[in-house]
Each structure stands twice: as structure tokens, then as C-alpha cells.
Image: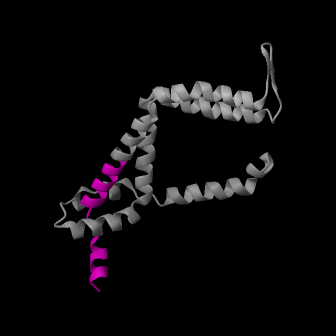
Amino acid sequence: MSIPDRISLDRIKSDFGSVSNSISKLRPPQEFFDIRRVSKPANFGEVQSRVGYNLNHFSANYIAIILLLSVYALITNLLLLFVTVFVIGGVIGINRLGGEDLVTPFGRFNVSQLYTGLLIVAIPLGFLASPISTMMWLIGSSGFTVFAHASLMEKPIETVFEEEV
């Protein structure tokens, strides 16, 4: 796929449309944080029913929470943020060469040598940045937050009457 195909106006419009569609599904904070609807579920069946409903109803809000927790995890782990930016920047820089060799005062480097050098630097830094523990923290914290909200938030009264009919 060539660069003009990747940056076509139609593709950008469709991608932006899907993002704006997801943003339009966000529920207002007054509804998401409505403390009048928070209660302890009576049994496990009610937990299942609430989680099923709330995961569908607040899905865009839950995605926003996971994204915010991801940003928080990267900001608090600056080495991981640096390694991520370094690798993405390195790959973009190597791709901009278009397969040509990089000529420096120190010598001539081909694309495979540049990728190898990037790996030699990025792998040890990646181990030091502890991405696995950051990912485990992100999975645990987002899973707890989403499940806690989904199980404690009651369904609206209208949906209870619809289920009985």
C-alpha cells in the first residue's frame, strides 16, 4: 500500500467518522456517575444481568476509562514511554528512507543494519521498562474498575419492566 493510499481523504473521513461515532455513544457524566442508581446486587444472577446490560450501555465510557488508565500508566512509567516513542520514531525514520542506505560521516548503513541496531538498543531498554508488569496493572485496574461499576450500577426502571413483559 503506497503512502497516497494510506493518506487518502476518503479513508481519513471514514476513520474520523468511526471515532466520532464512538464519541457520540459516550453517556453523559450525570448518567454514568448517578449515585442514586448504585446499590448492592441481591444475588449473582442480578450481577450477571447488570453487567450484561451496563457493558453494552456504557461501553464507550468504559473504553474511555481504559484509555485514561493507559495514558496514566505511560506517564507514570517514563522509561516505557521513552522506549515506545523511540521504537515508533525509529521505525518511521527507517521507513522514510524508502529502502535507501543511510549515509553518515561514520559510514553507510543499509535498512537491515538500521533495524538490527534499533532492536539492539530497544530490547534491553524494553526489559528495563517493565512492560509486562505495566500491562498486568492496566488489565487488573481497568477490569476491576469496569466490573465494579457495571455490577453496582442498577438498570434503569424502564428496562426492568421490559424484561417482565
Q: Indicate whether 159 appears above or below 23.
A: below
Q: Residue at x 51, y 56 (%)?
A: 23
Query: Is residue 125 found inside the magenta-colored segment of the image?
Result: no
How many discs appear? 0
Q: Residue at x 56, y 56 (%)?
A: 20
Going by the image, does 75 lie left or right of 7?
left
Q: Is residue 11 visible?
A: yes
Q: Residue at x 71, y 31 (%)?
A: 93
Q: Report which quarter residue 49 is drawn in.
A: bottom left
| Closer-to-camera residue (41/113) | 113
Q: Residue at x 74, y 50 (%)?
A: 6
Instruction: Give residue 61's position: percent from left, percent from top.
Output: 41, 54
Name the magenta segment's main secondary structure: helix
| Closer-to-camera residue (116/162) | 116
Q: Report which quarter residue 163 is drawn in.
A: bottom left
Q: Indicate whether 89 appears above or below 34.
A: above
Instruction: Give residue 101's position: percent from left, percent from top.
Output: 82, 27
Magenta-drawn segment: 142-165
